[in-house]
Image (cartoon, coloured by chain):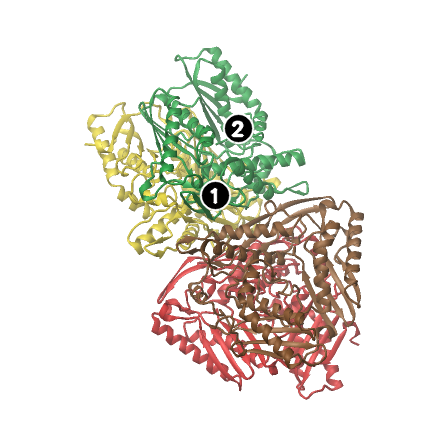
Chain colours: A green, B yellow, C brown, D red
Amino acid sequence: MFKQRNIVVSTASAQHVDEQPVEIVERKGIGHPDSLCDGIAERISVEYSRWCREHFGTLLHHNFDKVQLVAGETEVGYGYGELIQPIRIQIAGRGTPTYQGRQIPMHTIAIEAARAHLRESLRYLDPVRHVVIDSYAGKGASELAHAVDKVTANDTSFGVGHWPHSNLEHIVYQSARHINTELLQQLPLGEDVKVMGARIEDVITLTVCLPLIATEVHDQAEYLEVRAAAREAIQRFAGGLTKRAVQVDVNTADDPEAGAVYLTLTGTSAEMGDDGSVGRGNRVTGVIAPFRAASLEAAAGKNPISHVGKLYNLLALEAAREIVTVLPEVRAATVYILSQIGKPLDEPLVAHAQLAPQNGTLTRGAEQQIAEILDAQLADITTLRERILRMELCPF
Amino acid sequence: MFKQRNIVVSTASAQHVDEQPVEIVERKGIGHPDSLCDGIAERISVEYSRWCREHFGTLLHHNFDKVQLVAGETEVGYGYGELIQPIRIQIAGRGTPTYQGRQIPMHTIAIEAARAHLRESLRYLDPVRHVVIDSYAGKGASELAHAVDKVTANDTSFGVGHWPHSNLEHIVYQSARHINTELLQQLPLGEDVKVMGARIEDVITLTVCLPLIATEVHDQAEYLEVRAAAREAIQRFAGGLTKRAVQVDVNTADDPEAGAVYLTLTGTSAEMGDDGSVGRGNRVTGVIAPFRAASLEAAAGKNPISHVGKLYNLLALEAAREIVTVLPEVRAATVYILSQIGKPLDEPLVAHAQLAPQNGTLTRGAEQQIAEILDAQLADITTLRERILRMELCPF
Amino acid sequence: MFKQRNIVVSTASAQHVDEQPVEIVERKGIGHPDSLCDGIAERISVEYSRWCREHFGTLLHHNFDKVQLVAGETEVGYGYGELIQPIRIQIAGRGTPTYQGRQIPMHTIAIEAARAHLRESLRYLDPVRHVVIDSYAGKGASELAHAVDKVTANDTSFGVGHWPHSNLEHIVYQSARHINTELLQQLPLGEDVKVMGARIEDVITLTVCLPLIATEVHDQAEYLEVRAAAREAIQRFAGGLTKRAVQVDVNTADDPEAGAVYLTLTGTSAEMGDDGSVGRGNRVTGVIAPFRAASLEAAAGKNPISHVGKLYNLLALEAAREIVTVLPEVRAATVYILSQIGKPLDEPLVAHAQLAPQNGTLTRGAEQQIAEILDAQLADITTLRERILRMELCPF
Amino acid sequence: MFKQRNIVVSTASAQHVDEQPVEIVERKGIGHPDSLCDGIAERISVEYSRWCREHFGTLLHHNFDKVQLVAGETEVGYGYGELIQPIRIQIAGRGTPTYQGRQIPMHTIAIEAARAHLRESLRYLDPVRHVVIDSYAGKGASELAHAVDKVTANDTSFGVGHWPHSNLEHIVYQSARHINTELLQQLPLGEDVKVMGARIEDVITLTVCLPLIATEVHDQAEYLEVRAAAREAIQRFAGGLTKRAVQVDVNTADDPEAGAVYLTLTGTSAEMGDDGSVGRGNRVTGVIAPFRAASLEAAAGKNPISHVGKLYNLLALEAAREIVTVLPEVRAATVYILSQIGKPLDEPLVAHAQLAPQNGTLTRGAEQQIAEILDAQLADITTLRERILRMELCPF
């Protein structure tokens, strides 16, 4: 029955990452320059696709997975901030510029999408005043456009997804989100949060980088106060997510007496000193977990029609999530999907689910159920595509 | 003895990658747009460092790990090629623009370095005529410059290296190099080679993308002839590197009857349809091997003074290489080094060598020797830095 | 008494331009790409000066007289319009980037000033959505900054102004203004009006270029209707300004049957096909009158502190205007002021008023009065500067 | 006989410019930023035209009369010079990007043309190392392309030319050329020469700006020596061109004791502090002579097919030159040509030769001869076009 999809289900041999002696996990918050580039790239792909569907009733080939952010320059101090040189967003990427004799406003779509993403991601940054956005996007090579028409795998590529998060991944991911959603409403913090978690045996250290908003922090005392409040809140939040010992450090590079504090005008280090690029930040799981198998493909900005590097990564994640949700006897799932160049996307070379059962082994029935989940997910790649276009799945 | 460096030596529990059922490995050749960006970034870092040393006797903080390549546009056909729109190289990154009251010609250094790298990497591309290079680089945030002065770890970060290459990694890496060095002298091929290797059990498929040079290929017959010759040469070469079955496919997206062939004017897809960016290609091992633990840090372009993401990755690779070279009883080594933020680089939080012995276990003496190798490598980070500046270590 | 200012008053020998057999006069409306660049340049100078005064209590050296507008690309037709490629504004020019150890947000000021000018000049253009504005401005050569400190003439240069407008100049100037203010409220027209007047003896032809707004003109019939209404309104208006015969032509390059009509999305040809630059449009008199002596200096964007090319042109115009206003016996005045390099601005090499008396000669008293007017204007260059900074004087 | 061309021949009533009390003339040398932009613009037009003719056998519509030069940044001192930030050349302008289904390498042509012009104009500037050239050129509005097909006047426009140079014009023009050709071979001077001549009655002052080459001038003594030698040579040369008193000043803004001297690395102020733009420098006569009637149209870069602003200016100059050369009894000629929109170029609205006879009046025969010269020049506009394309006529 699953012959066609080449589905394999097996039990994982390796030690679960949670039990390995050392683990490192990082999450770049939504305001980090790399995350901003990922977000812009993905938004361009979505808006371009929506435009094409609205005007032509179809999706067109594109890959907007190249965006570079060049840091601006600011002068900030306690209580004030001034933008000297705006941030530059340089959009590259490839689209289909004309279709059926009609030009597609590719550059306008791209620039507006970038601006929309910035507007919705950063409270203190003014996407008009603080940023210069230009589009250098062009058309793809004709050969590739050709290959895409058939909607087969464009490459021998692969996707991987694992679920659930390890305990450290969970802490890092949720802490970053907590800061980006809750804490920002209580304290004058920017969105360019970075949480780096290191676990050595059962001791967890979270090193958090947190920009404070210069115009709302009026002196060193207030800075230290806000930083301490943030540290405590994160400590409390993260501590509640694990039984392990957690140590939270915030802005460790500070040297307040020497004037070295992390103040920003806009809430992101992109305003000064930190460039950004697509595919250099979080994986589709929302974290960077170097001890896990991971695709290096930047999912953000790639077309959701045919790009294996995007679709299989998200599909693998969704399948792993469904397996663990549906089958209580599965503690953890890792799904690998390998494309077969020139074959339809729902006929991979191999789709492999590696499972960690709660109690050592899986029943034949569970294996069958897992294979069915994988099969259904592959069969229904269209739904995945729609969810991407509705921005329900964040690839970073 | 090794207390200070927190060195751990252990035997690997996991199955060796060579014995896993599925393996995927990719190498982007030196002419691939992403590799070009990596190469340019690294060259800028090297030339900037050399300039500073020559003029100031010291190295200065920088991170030139952001370079974006925007594809050009060409019109090519059998026997001819014309550049319509040059390739754009947009250099970002952060340096120290002035030192001791003297300005550093950062932009000039960066642009010249980019041009030098292109000149030395691509035979058919004219780095003046075919490329517009501009520098948008700026200065770093003062806070970071401050932290760097002390040359301590700038981040909780980590590096990982493994040695030797698995069989598939070896085949992919060496085949790409063989094409980029030998085959290019015999056939009208460009440097933008991509080799994707997939192994399912003992069957290896190499999917190779190979641009042909338009001006030297005069008709379809000649195209097919060159492509076939290339395929055979790669098949012969790759076949000689393994006992497994190898199947080589070249330019699978071709449809010559429909005019879809892979012809280029300059030997790189950067001329049309393919943008590039730093850190999106090969890891420091020279390949992309998604089933291996790997750092996502882009090593290319980062400063070799203090950047853990660069230094520890290269150090881990060199240590693993030395371990395997010196100790015949070690079949494979993986080295992890974890930084301790705020501590000197040679005092990592932990440096961990995971080893696969030829026959199951390691002697106490071997373990001691391995720890000494790690210790010596860490103690001598200066030599590593010098080798980077002499461009003896390629981080991609 | 006027020795110090080297003031000369004389009677003009040449035939008045009104009486010459042929006369050509042109005005580029406020939405013309060249006028937009002039307006942006001037606005940058004003905003930069205001910022410096507000923050430092003084004005700083600058010349923002270089702005390039690169046309965008649109797709328009009856009833619709789409922006494909935004207009690019490339700001160059020189400013003082730091003063008393504080950085001046030169780029931010420049970009915001450009946006403000566009917003206030064009009703249908969205200065965010339709335009990408970037600043490449830099600092001036140290040598020049030095010379400026002393506020002496920076050059052997000159300014010239004449008053009143000739009859044709009056017609061209007022017609363009009439269209730009009145007619635009009644008809769907854009601001990129161009009025070219040619007079051969007593026959005047006005050739008017007038963009119609694509989204408000739904078919050819409506286009022809609007164009005819505009033509008639201009004919009526211009006819009322002269006793000569006036013939008005509108959009003579149209060929409606072939689809060649002048429709725009934004009201300016900058949206497609027409680049712009500073100093390529109207002189300080508001028109281009090639038979008149005129300075080629672009007044717009130059600093009002020391730049002779700006100050003397405006001063000459104001002086000529005052002479004619105050002395009914003067029919027309032309004022030339020549700088003396290295000398204070109010000590020109020569300030020369050439006058056309109503009845052939001027009384000694009138000459004295004229000399006094010139003297007072020169003495009070500060007031001129203030009027420039309040944008009461438009240099184009 | 000349009815068709509407040729008018008359005797000038106005005082010859040589006899007016005040005269100002300026020439920006070939290395001045504005002249560089003019030269680049013109070269692009020529190379684009040549390419089209070679590949299509025809010329295509274009106007490359917009080029902006953004000054670089250098650090110079006695004996050394370093480029910190390269000069940026931003090419705008409009061309026909495709013809008969084939793309024209417009950007490549433009960038190469710019580089060629720089290489041939400046000895110390390296057009690769010191300059970043990018092309933002686009296509024209379809409406204009349409109008051009018919090769009729594209505008109500006019051209004017006068011959010979006045004495001051002659001195300024020849002195600048003398410096740019002879003096540069003897002294370490750059090409960015500016000669400003002012004549008050019979006293002429030449104010000359002359960059010295930093790497070849080793101390203040040498600077002063070279400057003095240059001054003397110019004094000698200029003095030999007139019976009037001539005073030559060189680099009057210098203050050597305060370190304010005019040293450059590349021989042009474009390297630091001086931006450039097309149409802001010399008129087609090679000088800026504000007391003369002059067209404000930038001739450089405009297409030589249909652009009245270019063709009529050059034609008028050539006609004036021929008249004075052929008829010894004509002391000076000014030719005006006024286009008739929509009519062929050789049928102007009026072509008017205003002449200053040596002895007050012209014979009927001379008038007839002059009319014939004008008629022949108009009839043979093709030859003019060819001379432009062979770069025999310099429009600046």
Give percent across and percent down for residue C344. Answer: 48, 71
Q: How many marks?
A: 2
Instruction: Farthest residue to the front: give it.
Output: C365
Say which quadrant the C terminus of chain B sits in.
top left
Circle 1: residue type: Leu
Give percent across and percent down for residue C352. Answer: 59, 76
Which residue bears the numbered disc 1? Answer: A69
Instruction: Farthest residue to the bottom: give it.
Output: D359
Q: CA distance from mark 1 to mark 2?
A: 23 Å
Which residue bears the numbered disc 2? Answer: A393
Give percent across and percent down for residue C374. Answer: 58, 73
Characterize the local packing of mark 1: few (<14), some (14-19) or many (20 or more) Cα atoms within 10 angstroms.
many
Q: Quick check: C189 above or below C293?
A: above
Q: Which mark is residue B127?
A: none
Q: Secondary structure at mark 2?
A: loop
What is the chain letter for disc 2? A
Circle 2: residue type: Leu
Q: Is residue C300 left or right of residue B137?
A: right
Q: Quick check: C33 above or below B206?
A: below
Q: Quick check: C372 above or below C222?
A: below
